[in-house]
Image: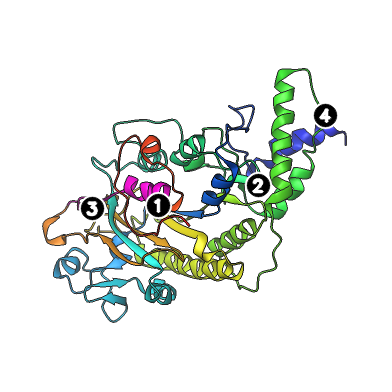
């Protein structure tokens, strides 16, 4: 098979396995770099984003045990005290999250309560766009918040990639801005298909030259992306466990990546919520325990920050189908060796919500400001379009 045919097969047939960032709009991934040593140091602090697709129900994730309003709003879905994992007098984890309790006891999990934004939108598509671009609810932005951050303070060109998205081709917060972002199902498939894209020299035609440049960038990423580390850690045999295993292999590469994005779901539990949420939260807990073990194994846990996000939460009042409908403020997690564990934000006052939703206690852009200002030591204001007070769930950058 001749080289042009090989390239066409890779570029067309490989879409289910990978996508290479915003290179379709930007012919070059070279940036005006910050001082290399400083940039490499800040982005050695790895960010792992976990998206709860569909909107997880926070009220049955962090359970307000003993709150009579909770039991009144959820006569069928309420989790009983004898099932829940108690963290404090009136706060407990869903029983499927029991594997996370030792990490909580070591104060390596921050639980962020009431995360949302003003004037919330209850459309899946619009609300996730708001979260991933860090826009106001009445504002549309083209680029993801991480893409804008990396445009301001670039990831060193020596890194294998700026970000890696595992399990889909939607680049989310990494979309746009000229980021070097790889979306892949697994490293082996990526490496096999990247071999078909071996650069074939220069071209006078501008469009073909751009394609060849894209191929060269893919090959460069592929050559460094898989650390091929033989972990002693046992990874769960679940879809999320497999994604965590892939993430761990990517993270073990010597060149480095700044961000790894995982997803879990769908949590869109309008009906039959109990069984589905229990299964998904169980996958989450087992996967996070494996990720922590793997990061400790390679000495990276203290330089890893795991943060969850979703388009929205669920309504406090259960519906007639033993499920919950689209809500607003939600519970999220931050985990890592340098996380200051504990509760942040405020628990919802369920006796005041009626049939509605509680207000947000933490603007989600405060979480992003924490990542930018405290984890990476960059200036969040230029990325987020204003000042958002960081939430002190993580120590300052090393």
* Label 3, residues with CA under 10 Å away: few <14, some 14-19, many ≥20: some
In the displayed structure image, the side of residue 218 where residue 373 appears, left or right: left
Q: Work out whether mark 4 precedes mark 2 in sequence or the reverse, and give the earlier one.
A: 2
- Mark 1 highlights which residue? 374
* Label 2, residues with CA under 10 Å away: few <14, some 14-19, many ≥20: many
Position in image of residue 393 (x %, y %): 35, 60
Position in image of residue 101 (x %, y %): 39, 75
Name the residue furthest right: 1
Residue 327 visible here: no
Instruction: Report the Cα–Cα distance between label 4 and label 2.
Output: 22 Å
Which circle, 2 or 3, is nearer the viewer? Answer: 2
Task: Determine which quarter of the picture holds residue 135.
Answer: top left
Q: Quadrant of the N terminus?
A: top right
Pick whichever, 171 or 125, lies toward us: 171
Q: Work out whether mark 1 precedes mark 3 in sequence or the reverse, and give the earlier one.
A: 3
Q: Work out whether mark 3 precedes mark 4 in sequence or the reverse, and give the earlier one.
A: 4
Position in image of residue 210 (x %, y %): 70, 25
In the depicted structure, whether residue 257 falls above or below residue 12? below
- Mark 3 highlights which residue? 361
Which circle, 4 or 2, is nearer the viewer? Answer: 2
| Residue at 35%, 62% in the rendered image | 273
Which circle, 2 or 1, is nearer the viewer? Answer: 1
In the displayed structure image, the side of residue 286 where residue 199 appears, left or right: right
Which circle, 4 or 1, is nearer the viewer? Answer: 1
Indicate the secondary structure of the residue bearing disc 2: loop
Q: Give the range drawn in magenta.
A: 356-373
Q: Work out whether mark 2 precedes mark 3 in sequence or the reverse, and give the earlier one.
A: 2
Which circle, 1 or 3, is nearer the viewer? Answer: 1
- Disc assigned to residue 160: 2
- Mark 4 highlights which residue? 201
């Amino acid at each position: 098979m001749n080289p042009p045919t090989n390239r066409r097969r890779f570029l067309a047939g490989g879409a289910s396995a990978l996508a290479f960032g915003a290179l379709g709009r930007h012919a070059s991934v070279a940036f005006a770099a910050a001082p290399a040593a400083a940039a490499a140091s800040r982005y050695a602090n790895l960010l792992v984003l976990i998206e709860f697709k569909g909107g997880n129900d926070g009220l049955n994730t962090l359970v307000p045990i003993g709150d009579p309003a909770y039991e009144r709003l959820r006569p069928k879905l309420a989790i009983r005290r004898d099932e829940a994992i108690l963290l404090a007098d009136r706060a407990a984890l869903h029983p499927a999250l029991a594997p996370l309790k030792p990490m909580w006891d070591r104060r390596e999990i921050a639980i962020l309560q009431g995360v949302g934004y003003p004037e919330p939108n209850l459309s899946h598509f619009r609300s996730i766009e708001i979260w991933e671009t860090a826009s106001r609810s009445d504002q549309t932005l083209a680029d993801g918040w991480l893409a804008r951050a990396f445009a301001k303070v670039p990831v060193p060109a020596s890194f294998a990639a700026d970000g890696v998205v595992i399990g889909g081709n939607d680049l989310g917060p990494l979309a746009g801005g000229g980021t070097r972002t790889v979306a892949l199902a697994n490293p082996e498939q990526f490496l096999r298909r990247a071999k078909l894209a071996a650069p074939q020299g220069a071209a006078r035609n501008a469009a073909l030259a751009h394609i060849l440049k894209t191929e060269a960038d893919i090959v460069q990423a592929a050559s460094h992306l898989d650390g091929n580390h033989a972990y002693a850690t046992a990874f769960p045999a679940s879809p999320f466990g497999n994604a965590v295993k892939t993430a761990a292999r990517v993270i073990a590469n010597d060149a480095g990546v700044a961000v790894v994005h995982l997803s879990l779901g769908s949590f869109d539990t309008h009906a039959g919520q109990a069984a589905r949420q229990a299964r998904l939260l169980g996958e989450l807990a087992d996967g996070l325990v494996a990720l922590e073990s793997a990061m400790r194994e390679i000495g990276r846990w203290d330089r890893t920050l795991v943060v969850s996000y979703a388009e929205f939460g669920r309504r406090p009042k259960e519906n007639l189908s033993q499920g919950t409908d689209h809500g607003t403020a939600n519970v999220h997690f931050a985990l890592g060796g340098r996380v200051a564990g504990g509760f942040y934000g405020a628990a919802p006052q369920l006796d005041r919500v009626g049939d509605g939703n509680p207000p947000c206690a933490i603007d989600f852009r405060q979480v992003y400001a924490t990542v930018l200002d405290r984890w990476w030591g960059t200036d969040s204001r230029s990325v987020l379009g204003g000042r958002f007070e960081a939430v002190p769930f993580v120590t300052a950058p090393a």
